[in-house]
Image (spheres, rainbow, N blue to C red):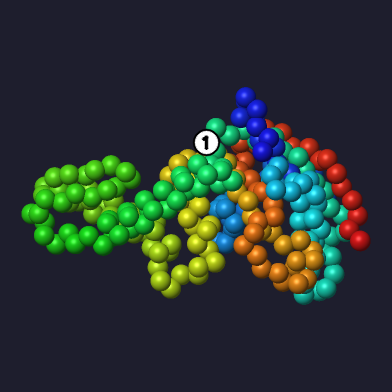
Amino acid sequence: MSLNADNIYIGYHGTDYDNVESILKNRFRISDKADEWLGHGIYFFTEGISDPIENAKEWAINQAWDKVAKRYSYQKYAVLKAEVSGERVLDLTTTEGLRVYNEMRNLFIREWVEVSKRNLSQKHAVLEAEVSGKRVLGLTMKEGLLDYNEKRNLFIREYESLFDRGRDIRQDNCKMSNLIIKRRKLDILINHLYIKNKTQRILNLVSNAPNTTVMLVTKPQSIKSIKIISSGEII
C-alpha cells in the first residue's frame, strides 16, 4: 500500500491503448455491473500480494481476448498510473478493516430483521427500533408511527434485493459493499482478491486464496493525476 501524509494512494489500471486518450481527457468511468468485486467504482491494482503493474498489464491483455471469436479484440494494451486522494478508506487487507466490514454487515442484518419484520399493527404499544444506529422511542404517537413506517419502508427497498431468497448470490459482494460504501461515505475500499491469470483462466481454476490486491475508488474526483507508464503489442 502506498500512502503518505497527504493520504495519496497509488493504483495501476490496465486497458485498451485506444482508451488512453479518452481517459486522460475525461477521466475514468464508474464500473457499475451488478456483480462487481468490491462494489461500484473505479478499479486499480495496488501494492500488496503481487506486482500491481504486472497485474494491470495481464488484466488488459486477458480482457482483450474474445472467447466467442477466438481472437484479441484489440492489439495494444496500456498501463496507467493514478494518484488517488482518500481520507475515508476501508482496508480489508487488515484485521481492523475486516472487523469494521463484519460489524457493518451484521448491523445491516439486524436492521433488516428488526425494521422490515416488526409488526406495527399494535399502534398503542411502546415500540423501539434501531434505525441507522439511533434509538427511536415513543412510537405510540401517530407522528412517530408514520416516521417509523417511512424508515422501515426505506430499509426494505434498500435491503430486499440483498436478502431476498430468490436473489442472484453472485451479486452479494457487490451489493453489500455498495451499502457499506454508502453508509460510511467511503472514498476507497481495498481488498485482496483472486483474479485468474491467463493460465488459470485456461484451466478455469477456482481458488479462495487471493493473488492480487485491488483498490476501488468510489468517486472520479478523488483521482488527482493519471499518466501512462507502459504499453505494448498483444501477441
Horizontal and vertical percent for residue 2? 68, 35
Q: Residue at x 65, y 32 (%)?
A: 3
Q: Nearer the viewer, residue 207 or 227?
A: 207
Q: Residue at x 61, y 36 (%)?
A: 222
Horizontal and vertical percent for residue 223? 65, 36
Q: Which residue is at the far top? A: 5
Q: Which residue is mark 1?
A: 88
Horizontal and vertical percent for residue 52? 75, 46
Q: Residue at x 80, y 66 (%)?
A: 199
> Along the horizontal axis of the image, is 190 left or right of 81?
left
Residue 15 appearing in the image: no
Residue type indicated by callout 1 = Arg
Would you place residue 13 above or below residue 84 in this image? Answer: below
Local SS, label 1 = loop
Would you place residue 103 above or below residue 67 in this image? Answer: above
Circle 1 packing at 10 Å, graded few (<14), some (14-19), many (20+), is some
Residue 159 appearing in the image: yes
> Along the horizontal axis of the image, is 83 left or right of 168?
right
Q: Nearer the viewer, residue 23 or 60?
A: 60
